[in-house]
Amino acid sequence: DPRGIYACKVINGKRGEPFQVYYRMCQNCIEVDASTISGIVVADVIATAFLAVAVYCITGQDKGRLSRASDRQNLIANEQLYQ
């Protein structure tokens, strides 16, 4: 604990002006080392790849669908009916 009152000693035995050091530590902090950061990055890359594959599989299902007659609009040839 580095908190306290400190003073510098001069060569001839005199003391310098005292100064107070107050050091406050974080209560809810955790240490993060290189292995933790690399684990988070790897997990993020895996999750992103899984999400990309899932989106690709879901959106790729419309490729094999054939257009049906019911999907097409039936246009009326006679324009007088619109008037």
Image: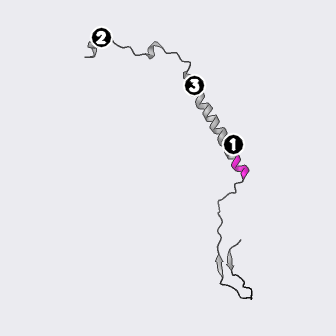
Q: Which residue is mark 3?
A: 60
Residue at screen point 74% across, 86% down: 11
Q: Is residue 20 left or right of residue 64?
A: right
Vertical arrangement, residue 37 with respect to residue 58, above or below = below
**Residue 43 image position (x, y, % from top left):** 68, 42
Amino acid beneath label 3: Gly
Q: Is residue 33 magenta?
A: yes
- Kindly identify the amino acid type of the residue bearing the numbered disc 2: Asn
Vertical relation: 30 (above or below) 40: below
Residue at the (72%, 51%) spot, across then down: 34
Residue under label 2: 78
Density class for disc 1 (Cα within 10 Å; few <14, some 14-19, many ≥20) is: few
Q: Which mark is residue 21?
A: none
- The amino acid at mark 1 is Val
The local secondary structure at tag 3 comes to helix
- Specify the quadrant of the image occupied by residue 18: bottom right
Mark sitting earlier along the chain (2/1): 1
Q: Earlier in the sequence, mark 2 or mark 3?
A: 3
Q: Quadrant of residue 4?
A: bottom right
What residue does disc 1 label?
A: 42
For the residues labelled 3 and 1, the Cα–Cα distance comes to 27 Å
- Name the colouring of the figure: one colour
Q: Specify the segment rendered in magenta.
A: 28-38
- Determine the residue positioned at 64% across, 68% down: 24
Query: 10 Å neighbourhood of mark 2: few (<14), some, or many (≥20)?
Result: few
Element carrying mark 2:
loop
Quarter containing the C terminus: top left
Residue 72 percent coordinates (x, y): 43, 16
Identify the residue at horizontal 68%, vertical 85% (top origin): 16
Q: Is 71 one of the magenta-colored residues? A: no
